[in-house]
Amino acid sequence: MRVRCSLAEAPCPAVLTMARLLLLRVSPARKCACALLSRGGSTAAGSEYLHRSVVPTMHYQRSLPRLPIPTLEDTIERYLSAQRPLLHDEQYRKTEQLARSFQKGIGKELHEQLAAQDKRNKHTSYISGPWFDMYLCAREPIVLNFNPFISFTPDPKSEYNEQLTRATNMTVSSMRFLKTLRAAYLAPEVFHLNPVKSDTQTFKKLVRLVPSFLSWYAAYMVNAYPLDMSQYFRLFNSTRLPKANRDELFTDEQAKHLLVLRNGNFYVFDVLDKDGNLVKPSEIQAHLKYILSDSSPAPEFSLGYLTSEERNTWALLRQKLLENGNEEALKKVDAAVFCLCLDDFPIKDHNHLSHNMLHGTGLNRWFDKSLSLIIAADGTAAVNFEHSWGDGVAVLRFQNEVFQDSTQSPAVTPQSRPAPVDSSKAVQKLHFHLDSALKAAVAEAKKKFDSTMKTLTIDTMQFMAGGKEFFKKQGVSPDAVVQLAFQVAFFRQYNQTVATYESCSTAAFKHGRTETIRPASVHTKKCAEAFVKEPAKHSAAEFREMINECSKYHSQLTKEAAMGKGFDRHLFALRYLAASQALPVPDLFQDEAYRLINHNILSTSTLSSPAVQFGGFAPVVPDGFGVAYGVHDDWVGCNVSSYPSRNVQEFLQCVHHALEDIFQVLEGKSVKG
């Protein structure tokens, strides 16, 4: 069997299925959510490890295929196809002319330079460096603009949702994950197209013997596709540090302490001993109980608000903090394994959950930490994560593993007694020295934070008539149908088709990040116009044909994106290359149409995992919607955010209406309109 180092030669069904399972829906360079991931290896309940994989964690990393750079011709064609439904004829002709001129002129030169640069840097992908810069150079506050949240499903055993019990179990499971990862026992991320052959102990024992520079090929030959895991090390002991003009990522894997925030107060205690062993769960429980029983009032000037500031402002203030003798305390914050936020109130409903886990009051958060585990008084739990270090694949793997371990192999029970230790000596409460200028800065940051958060609206919708199983029986892509519903809904509400963003992971490639799927197409526009403007003029069969076309085209876009064959990342890299050489901005990138297609009014993200209740994020533009959605076996759910310029409730009503119409058609009935 001839094997080449490119997923482009992998069977298309495999890539398409992988695209759906690994779907990492994020907004344009901003938000993120993810999908179910495979795991493997034997469990080790009660031990310091989640499991001990036969195949070392990074065994496939060296031989992963490299992310391909699309041909410039294909990129331009895909770009123009995405622009067609967004532009009037005259606008389109202008954009087409600019695109063709770019293709023949400066674009060709830049593409050749990019390809040559890529050949010199075979250890990474062509998008990795520019993508890091895009995040780290952004000066907007990371709250709402970058950090998303993903909430955990409640523990099936209701009594285990008591805050102290769940916080202890999730902390212990998180540390088991950390130790499993660092010991190389964590099962590699692999998509198994034929698990009967590849997801077996026999194959794992064999592939373990294959040299790492050949291991990917061995997996490929049995239709298994290993994924990039280069981002995983940033899950722990990491923080985004504010710096002038470009932030830095800091990681200290030697640190052994946990950062706990409660009522705006900062606490640290070791969760690993001096030899790197996990501290006893009963001791962790005792320390958390001690923190929960601390009656200290909230500080008048809570430092966490500063992490919600504009990044250059925060960089200057951090420097002042260091100059005021806070270096040791800040180092404790930055180096902590992760941040555990214990909130003193229960969650009222889904909307309250979304607001609290996405931004909260700002009092009890440190948004710069790579990973924050938030647990409310009723045990409702979620992850809020800083986005620059990586994408949601690693976060969801963490979430899946922690949920499974903490619910199936809990370290403590509701009846467990904390260890009889002196937590007052083990737990250190951090104190920060603030002068009048810093106090004023914290007060100003809080004022901005409160003002901004008041502008955000979040609401949810559940469509209970059917879901994934129904769509599959009808022979259409579940994701394509729901994306079509968003197009129909927006057209019904605002009478236009707008730039829409949906991203899938390119983790099948070394240092792959994401590529964009552009759900708004000539097919969805035609279908939306028919549903909204003239439903009576079309038969159920005609509508069905339009839906089939939308599904087919969306599946093609998904497959291309998963294979690294979209247009967004390629054009981004070319623009980045021109800027790095101080070249004049090419005309293509000065075109108003280019600006508008990157002004993503509909930013969409999907979630799928038994460990996940739902997730959410803010819109990426002031006049946009942030659409987090899940297509479940027998229902569809949406969690949508907006600022005052858009009406979330009306949009959700329109989505529900659109899904009702689509279901009518798929059932062979006429559309009521």
Image (spheres, helix red, strand yellow):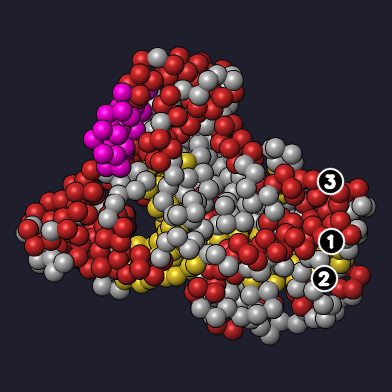
Label at residue 319: 3
Q: Earlier in the sequence, mark 3 or mark 1?
A: 3
Element type at mark 3: helix
Q: CA distance from mark 3 to mark 2?
A: 21 Å
Q: Which residue is mark 2?
A: 300
CB under 8 Å between discs 1 and 2: yes
Picture residue at 81% right of the left edge, 49% below the top: 318
Q: 359 and 386: which one is in front?
A: 359
Left/right of residue 292 with respect to residue 407 in the rendered view = right
Left/right of residue 664 with respect to residue 6 in the rendered view = left
Q: Quadrant of residue 285?
A: bottom right
CB under 8 Å between discs 3 and 1: no
Element type at mark 2: loop
Q: CA distance from mark 1 to mark 2?
A: 9 Å
Kind of residue at badge 2 = Glu
Query: How many neighbours does mark 1 have within 10 angstroms: few (below 14), some (14-19), or many (20 or more)?
Result: some
Q: Earlier in the sequence, mark 1 or mark 2?
A: 2
Picture residue at 41% right of the left edge, 26% below the top: 588
78 drawn magenta? yes
Vertical order, 248 against 158 (above or below) = above
Q: Which residue is mark 1?
A: 439
Kind of residue at badge 1 = Lys
Query: How many neighbours does mark 3 have within 10 angstroms: few (below 14), some (14-19), or many (20 or more)?
Result: some
Kind of residue at badge 3 = Gln
Query: How many neighbours does mark 2 have within 10 angstroms: few (below 14), some (14-19), or many (20 or more)?
Result: few
Vertical order, 341 against 13 (above or below) = below
Magenta segment, principal secondary structure?
Answer: helix
| Magenta residues, start to end | 72-97
Q: Earlier in the sequence, mark 3 or mark 2?
A: 2
